[in-house]
Each structure stands twice: as structure tokens, then as C-alpha cells.
Image: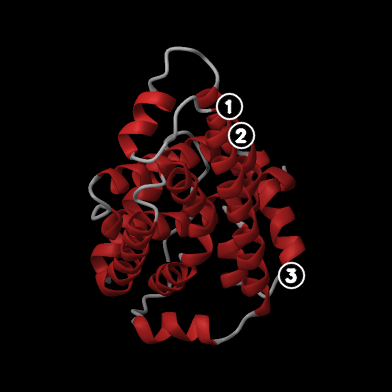
Amino acid sequence: MVPTQPVTLQSPLRWLALGWADLRRNPVPGLAHGLLLAAFGGLLLLAARDRFWLLAGAFSGFLIVAPVLATGLYTVSRAHQSGRRVGLAEVLALWRSGDGRLVRFGLLLGLAGTGWVLTSAGLITLWSPVPIQKPLDFLHHVVLEPRLGLFEAWLLLGGLLAAPVYASTVVALPLLVDTPMPVGQAVAQSWRAVASSPGPAALWAVMIVMLIVLGMLMALLGLVVAIPLVGHASWHAYRDLQAGAGRRVDS
């Protein structure tokens, strides 16, 4: 079993290294997750290719919902800790188990993601001086707009929504896979863990966004590796953050 370590600003790099080791040790479940989510991203791109005002919200909303889709990867990393190797059958068994806690959490994240998609689309549509239909339109008239306003408001609103979702999920979702703890208690524990290590937790959030965005920019193909890497690393982040919160309480 990989021992937990005190949480510092260097911890996110350790989590990535451990996540990469998990992926190399048992690549099939992780790459299957990555392929499925990259394919889903391709469908989003195809469906909204001429409505980038909607696509921008859909892909950023994807970041909100993605953690619940990675719960199968937590099962793989947890098995590695005890020296076991699991395959897709065990991952599928988690989904077929019909765990009501994961279902409820997934529905809540889905609602949050949908809310952000609608908010993002409305903000861009109403505020932009020209129709935003293509990626270049978004780049020229939103991101590179010299006047302050739309892009900054879009980022601010996205951050205000993403921050509490991240604090509620970063420890809670792996905890639900790892223990029979109720959803409410898991979310409270997740907030305590983030509050006990705010700097490393914030840095880890930034690194997650950077890796996923990088994967998207690589014609979505980068998600095939980025998704399982982040998923496996998130398991190790959970263990250190959870242990760190316990140590803080004990002290």
C-alpha cells in the first residue's frame, strides 16, 4: 500500500507521478475511460460545431460532471494499494451495483453542469456584440476582446460555480467508492479536507483544469491519456487530503 504523506505544495506532483504509475501498471481500464470521454467530447463538438456559444459552456460543464465519470478509476487505484489488479469487469461492476449514493451525486453534478451550460450560453449570447458560432469567433470577440467585460465575467461565474463543486467532490467521490459513508457526510469531509490544505488543493484544481484543457486542445485525443491520469492521481490526492485533515484534527 502506498503510504500517505503530509500535504504540501509539492503534493500535486506526487499525485500525478502515482497516477501515472497506476496507468502504466494497468492501462486498459484507464484508456477505455479516456477513449469514451474523448468520443463524448467529439459528439459535443459535432453537435454544436456552429454554436460555439453553447459549446464553450458544454465543455466547461464537462469539467464539473467528469469526476463522477472517473469513479471506476478509483476502483483500479484502490486495488493497486492492496497488490491486486482489476480489469474492466470490476469497473463495470461498480456501475452495475446501482449505488444510490453515486447516482444521487451524479444527478446533482449533472444539474450543476446543465446550469452552467445554460448560464454560459445566455451570458455569451446576450453580452457578445456579434454572434458566437465558431471557435475563432469565441477567441476574437470574447477571449481577445480588448475591453474588459464578457470574458472576465464568464471566467468569474465559471469559477464561482466550479469552486464549491470541486470542494464538494475532490474527496467525497473517492470516499463514497472507498467507504459506505452517506453523501452528506462525505461532502462535509471533503470540505474539511480542502480547508485543511487550501493551497495544495487549489493548486491541484488548477493542474486538473490545465491537463484537461491541454487534452482538449490536442484535437480531444489528449483526453485519452489526460482523463485516466487525472482520475488515478485524484485517488492519491484523496488519500493524502483525507489523512491530512485527520492529522489536523488530531493535533
Whether the residues at callouts 2 and 3 have beta carbons within 8 Å, the answer is: no
Q: Secondary structure at mark 3?
A: loop
Q: Secondary structure at mark 2?
A: helix
Amino acid on which disc 2 is placed: Leu
Whether the residues at callouts 2 and 1 have beta carbons within 8 Å, the answer is: yes
Q: Which residue is mark 1?
A: 153
Question: Residue 44 falls in which quadrant of the image?
Answer: bottom left
Report, in whole angstroms, how far the alpha carbon at label 1 lies from the one at label 3.
Answer: 36 Å
**Res 157 label:** 2
Instruction: Name which residue lies at 32% across and 73% down.
Output: 29
Q: Which residue is mark 3?
A: 182
Q: Secondary structure at mark 1?
A: helix
Height in image: 233 above or below 99?
above
Report, in whole angstroms, how far the alpha carbon at label 2 lies from the one at label 1.
Answer: 6 Å
Which circle's residue, 2 or 3, is located before the other in the chain?
2
Q: Residue 63 location in percent, x, y? A: 48, 51
Report, in whole angstroms, how far the alpha carbon at label 2 lies from the one at label 3.
Answer: 30 Å
Residue 250 shown left or right of residue 30 in the figure: right
For label 3, the crowd category at 10 Å Cα-Cα, with few meaning under 14, some 14 to 19 and many 20 or more, is few
Name the residue nearer the viewer: 2 or 29: 29
Name the residue nearer the viewer: 80 or 111: 111
For label 2, the crowd category at 10 Å Cα-Cα, with few meaning under 14, some 14 to 19 and many 20 or more, is some
